[in-house]
Image: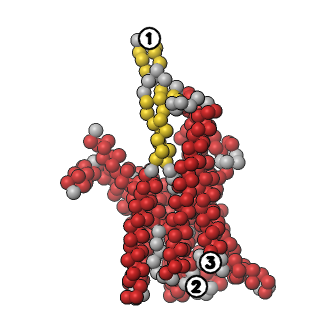
């Protein structure tokens, strides 16, 4: 407790750190205010019942920061920007110039790469807003919407998403951590009181053992997320001794930490995005089609909900595969081997060059197996618990828990680093 108050005192005295925290909190207040401003012409009661009875839009609402539940001006959240960033990362595997821009051209290259992601987010936001507003219009959620009102709603939704993306980047630059992650984290946390109140309102004494089981499993999951997120595989590295005149350098032994879960939560988000595409297309076809065959096809796609073993198996496989794929995008054994060799470093017992590259690739593949299995289990665990207990009012584990714990850990690290710098 004394340590906590000592750190709090240091944080308050450090003007730079205090301003970063205040900027982050102020931008979060703006974000929550924007999420309460609805697009004109929305039937709030009809919307609430529709979202509550549709798992597909419930998931979209989670990643929009709660903005979709009120059809606010930021109903899309940062989803288009996240999707654009993922697509750009995947394109680096196929376009060498993009890979060089992101990894080899320094800060200027990364800024240019980020600009491409922002530009790609605009058409994605237009497509997503058009699809969602059309579906909601066909469901009667928009009252007396004209063509001009439809176009206005699309423009407002796209502008809101771009503004929220800008808030996230300002938060990243002037705040204390990654702004996009904090926005998603704030949206998830803001939805907790509503979820808990619904669970208490529908509470049945006969379900008490299940709720106790949820609490125990929740604590175990938090422990597991912390352990896997913080787990590292140290690769020992020795720098060759160099003598230049009377100066001796090198001869130092250290290690390179390789994280067990290098991909973070990205594989789950990307797998979820792919699984949402058939449902979004199904809702669109159902809303637009008049042919009976098309209607049947659209209903079949829209019915691909989070139920059934097929959905769970596909979800598990996608998360597992994308964990390996995204790790391959972000970690290049060849480049690390070259950097070690250029710096006069080597792994003890391993020849520099190709042998070091193969060794690093083997180690990364083995530790990624643990991370991929963990992410896959975390992703499908709520589906398993829901199938066993039949309780849908509590979403145990999953992406939300992983994001919340990961963001909290990152915030603690950032604040501790800034406090350590102040003490030095």
Task: Name the foreground residue: 95 vs 68.
Answer: 95
Determine the secondary structure under disc 1: loop
Image point (77%, 81%), residue name: 294
Q: Which residue is mark 1?
A: 245
Q: Position of residue 423 (x, y in %)?
A: 26, 42
Determine the secondary structure under disc 2: loop
- Ranked by sequence position, the earlier of labels 3 and 2 is 2
Residue 11 in the image: above or below residue 105? below
Q: Position of residue 59 (x, y in %)?
A: 54, 73
Residue 52 in the image: above or below residue 176? below
- Ranked by sequence position, the earlier of labels 2 and 1 is 2
Image point (20%, 54%), residue name: 2
Give the residue furthest to the left: 2
Q: CA distance from mark 2 to mark 1?
A: 80 Å
Mark seen at residue 141:
2
Task: Say which quadrant the C terminus sits in.
Answer: top left
Task: Write down the quadrant of residue 105 in the picture.
Answer: top right
Image point (39%, 81%), residue name: 209
Q: Crowding at label 2, few (<14), some or many (≥20) Cα neighbours within 10 Å?
A: many
Q: Which residue is mark 3?
A: 308
Q: CA distance from mark 1 to mark 3?
A: 72 Å
């Amino acid at each position: 407790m004394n340590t906590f108050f000592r750190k709090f005192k240091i944080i308050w005295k450090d003007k730079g750190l205090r301003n970063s925290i205040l900027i982050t909190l102020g931008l979060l207040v703006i974000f929550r205010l924007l999420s309460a401003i609805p697009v004109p012409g929305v039937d709030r009661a009809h919307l609430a019942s529709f979202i509550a009875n549709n798992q597909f839009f419930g998931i979209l609402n989670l990643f929009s920061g709660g903005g979709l539940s009120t059809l606010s001006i930021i109903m899309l959240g940062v989803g288009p920007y996240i999707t654009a960033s993922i697509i750009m990362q995947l394109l680096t595997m196929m376009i060498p110039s993009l890979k060089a821009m992101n990894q080899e051209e320094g800060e200027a290259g990364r800024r240019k790469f980020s600009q491409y992601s922002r530009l790609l987010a605009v058409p994605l936001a237009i497509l997503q807003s058009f699809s969602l507003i059309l579906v909601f219009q066909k469901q009667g959620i928009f009252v007396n919407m004209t063509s001009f009102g439809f176009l206005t709603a699309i423009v407002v939704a796209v502008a809101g998403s771009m503004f929220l993306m800008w808030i996230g980047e300002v938060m990243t630059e002037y705040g204390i951590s990654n702004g996009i992650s904090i926005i998603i984290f704030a949206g998830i946390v803001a939805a907790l009181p509503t979820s808990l109140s619904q669970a208490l309102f529908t509470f049945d004494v006969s379900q008490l053992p299940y709720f106790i089981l949820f609490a125990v499993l929740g604590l175990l999951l938090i422990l597991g997320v912390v352990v896997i997120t913080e787990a590292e595989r140290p690769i020992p590295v020795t720098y060759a001794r160099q003598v230049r005149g009377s100066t001796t350098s090198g001869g130092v032994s250290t290690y390179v930490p390789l994280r067990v879960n290098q991909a973070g939560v990205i594989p789950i988000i990307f797998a979820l995005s792919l699984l949402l595409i058939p449902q979004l297309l199904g809702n669109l076809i159902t809303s637009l089609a008049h042919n009976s065959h098309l209607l049947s096809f659209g209903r079949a796609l829209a019915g691909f909900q989070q139920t059934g073993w097929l959905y769970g198996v596909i979800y598990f496989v996608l998360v597992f595969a994308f964990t390996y794929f995204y790790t391959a995008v972000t970690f290049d054994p060849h480049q690390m081997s070259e950097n070690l060799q250029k710096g006069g470093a080597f792994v003890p017992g391993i020849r520099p060059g190709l042998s070091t590259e193969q060794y690093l690739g083997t180690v990364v593949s083995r530790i990624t197996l643990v991370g991929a299995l963990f992410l896959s289990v975390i992703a499908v665990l709520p589906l398993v618990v829901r199938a066993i207990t039949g309780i849908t009012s509590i979403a145990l584990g999953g992406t939300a828990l992983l994001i919340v714990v990961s963001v909290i850990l990152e915030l603690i690290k950032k604040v501790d680093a800034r406090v350590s710098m102040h003490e030095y």
